[in-house]
Amino acid sequence: MAASAEKNHRALLAGTALLVLLLGLQIVLANRDALAENPAWRPWISRLCLLASCQLEAWRQPEAFVPVRQAVAADRGQADVLIVQLSFRNDAQWPQPWPQIEIRLTDVDNQAIAMRRFRPKEYLNADQEGDIKPGQTVSVEIALQETSGKAAGFAFDFH
């Protein structure tokens, strides 16, 4: 009888340990997007999602987009239109979706006279799809209406 009780006790302990492990796994899966925002956790959560057939939100690290080239010029074909050309590189460890691009026009005193955020669908060409891979440099061109005639400079940021 003692051997049977000990066997039942071990089975109960093993079952309890398994349930605690499964509960921990469930908690990790439920919080996977929050955990995956941490670069140290993301590889582990990515592997777990491969096994569990779950999805992770895209990696977003706008500060990892590094400007490579920037230029602004008047559009020769249209009055009051400026063409902004930007090339930037993804220095993040993982692919990232295309960012929102904020462009600010400034006057001669470097005071903002206009600002607008462009969503990817507003500036991407048909051939620019998918995420931007780590180390990949991309180029975009954005047309801006500028009717004040006061724009002397510009600045941009990624969001």
Image (spheres, rainbow, N blue to C red):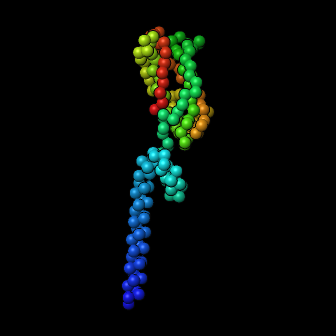
Residue 78 percent across, percent down from the top left: 55, 13
Residue ID at (45%, 46%): 38
* Location of residue 89 with respect to 27 vertically, above or below: above
* Location of residue 142 with respect to 128 vertically, above or below: above
* Location of residue 47 with respect to 141 vertically, above or below: below
Foreground pick, 29 / 7:
7
Residue ID at (53%, 16%): 82
Whether residue 55 is visible to the viewer of this picture, yes or no, is: no
Residue 101 percent across, percent down from the top left: 49, 28
Whether residue 29 is visible to the viewer of this picture, yes or no, is: yes
In the rendered image, which quarter is residue 125 located in? top right
Residue 141 percent across, percent down from the top left: 56, 24
Q: Residue furthest top?
A: 149
Query: As drawn, is 150 to the left or to the right of 93?
Result: left
Residue ID at (56%, 29%): 88
* Location of residue 89 with respect to 46 vertically, above or below: above
Q: Residue furthest front?
A: 40
How many marks do you count on the picture? 0
Residue 106 percent across, percent down from the top left: 45, 16
Q: Residue furthest bottom?
A: 1
Foreground pick, 99 / 80:
99
Foreground pick, 20 / 51:
20
The image quadrant where one finds the N terminus is bottom left
